[in-house]
Amino acid sequence: MEQIGKNHEEAGKYISAEDVNRFCYCPYQYYYSLTVNKIPRGTKKISKRFKKGKKYHKAYDRGLKMQNFIRIVAGLASAVLILWIGWKIWSLL
């Protein structure tokens, strides 16, 4: 498979790590990075898609931050519960 990236003159028989990262982060971003140069600027259809994508990523990032917050709170609550149970058992001895 030929490299698809910014430097088409040095395209070899590989895909760059940047392309893989871009595809893993968002396949649509990868696709649009390949086709955006071929589409005239100001096309309403494309600008709507970019706005929709930005909105999606903003909501997705917000969800990830919330998940991380919940994991931290759950971890702290678990640690407190374990310490409390340990203290109760130790006080019975």
Image (tube, helix red, strand yellow):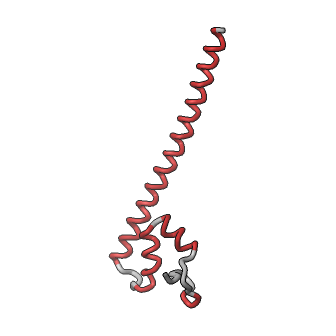
Look at 59% across and 88% down and name the residue there: 10
At a point 44% along the width and 68% down the height, the residue shown is 27
In the rendered image, the quadrant that contains the C terminus is top right
Depth check: give the residue in front, 80 or 55: 80
Where is residue 15? Give x, y as percent. Answer: 53, 77
Query: Residue at the top extreme?
Result: 92
Rendering coords of residue 61 (x, y %): 49, 55
Asked which quadrant contains residue 39, the reply is bottom left
Q: In the picture shown, does residue 65 fall above or below 9?
A: above
Going 61% across and 14% down the picture, which residue do you hit?
Answer: 88
Judging depth in this view, the residue of 33 and 86 nearest the camera is: 86
72 up-or-down from 42: above or below: above
Query: In the picture shown, does residue 89 fall above or below 60?
Result: above
Q: Position of residue 11 (x, y in %)?
A: 55, 86
Residue 78 at x, y percent in the picture: 56, 30
Q: Residue at x 53, y 35 (%)?
A: 74
